[in-house]
Image (spheres, grey):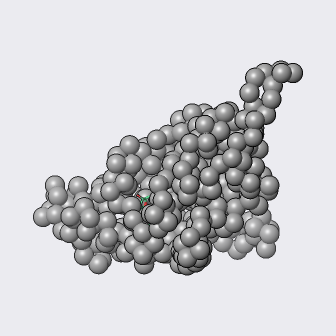
Amino acid sequence: MNWDDTTDTPAAERLVGASADGEDQAVEAALRPKDLGEFIGQEKVREQLDLVLRAARARGATADHVLLSGAPGLGKTTLSMIIAAEMNAPIRITSGPAIQHAGDLAAILSSLQEGEVLFLDEIHRMSRPAEEMLYMAMEDFRVDVIVGKGPGATAIPLELPPFTLVGATTRAGLLPPPLRDRFGFTGHMEFYEPAELERVIHRSANLLDVEIDADGAAEIAGRSRGTPRIANRLLRRVRDYAQVKADGLITRDIAQAALAVYEVDARGLDRLDRAVLVALLKLFGGGPVGLSTLAVAVGEERETVEEVAEPFLVREGLLARTPRGRVGTPAAWAHLGLTPPRSTATGNGQQDLFGA
Ligand SMILES: Nc1ncnc2c1ncn2[C@@H]1O[C@H](COP(=O)(O)OP(=O)(O)OP(=O)(O)O)[C@@H](O)[C@H]1O
Ligand SMILES: [Mg+2]
């Protein structure tokens, strides 16, 4: 589902973009871990959540509201379904953008069963009036339904059965504090370690009936940007290659050859990421250069460069956003096998840009 109606996300078309496209959604449903024991990595969140859920179960109570934050594809939706499964509760799934009016939310809330899990994806994109209704529902399990319009309008209080709200957001910083404070537990999802992604890949390969050896899994894991969704997607593309060009077994050689075809490099950078770095280093000597200029140089929209390519490049320490513009780091020069100009090599010109 693409709930984002304001932008036509280019990330969805990219092999290493972290958002989900149609094919992903179908496969994802099949690959989702079903309980906490099956969920790989995120040790901290898993342990904390395990305690929260166990304690609630022991008390025979409904679990506290849970907020899950983290980058796309790290397992927020998966974990929300696991919460429902662990509580043996039904789950209702909706999203912030789908709730434009307080009435939309009231309709959902008033039809919840006792103990039900309400999963509210992209919770930071809910409308203001709905948000205010949610405060009361979370705290007091009560909403005021407004009947009528104008001076004759009356608020009818409606009792709700206790439920567990699971909110997910890629942008925890955008949540108003009163909303954030009403969650009894907040789990922040981190990017996965390569070893964890290897386990994700082996598990998925098993479920998809794909043969892969340890080196093949390690090769794919290293290019998956710390993200299980990307790991699963790369696995499927490498499987295609292994099927068509070899005997089906995924080895390191096969993974490397396949990912070369799909232009995903050893560090997980794709064509756009590399185009941005090449322009930054080769055309602008490593910067600083303004975002708009950089975007024109690679023939992309400003937003695409900023929102699709840059977050990963920044995270990898390949690009820095400075007040004077974008700057390629020494690691970027090394990654592309280029020699930085003297001023960068000696650190004189750019060192102070990094605040050193
Ligand atoms: N810990 C994990 N172990 C195994 N597989 C995982 C794990 N986390 C995520 N996955 C896999 O990655 C896929 C994407 O996860 P999920 O849809 O839960 O991400 P998300 O955080 O909700 O992303 P978005 O922000 O785009 O909604 C799932 O299909 C699942 O198979
Ligand atoms: Mg999700």
The image shows a total of numbered marks equal to 0
Q: Quadrant of residue 16?
A: bottom left
Q: Nearer the viewer, residue 318 or 154?
A: 154
Which residue: 76% across, 61% down?
Answer: 181
Q: List x then y, in percent, for residue 341.
A: 64, 64
Indicate left or right for 167 with 259 as reference.
Answer: right
Residue 294 visible at all: no
Q: Examine the rendered structure and indicate whether residue 75 appears above or below residue 105.
A: below
Which residue: 45% across, 63% down?
Answer: 88
Indicate left or right for 246 with 330 as reference.
Answer: left
Q: Quadrant of residue 277?
A: bottom right
Q: Quadrant of residue 349?
A: bottom right
Indicate left or right for 230 with 62 as reference.
Answer: left
Q: List x then y, in percent, for residue 306.
A: 63, 48
Q: List x then y, in percent, for residue 305.
A: 59, 46
Which residue: 50% across, 40% down?
Answer: 2
Which residue: 62% across, 52% down?
Answer: 161
For the C terminus, the quadrant is bottom right
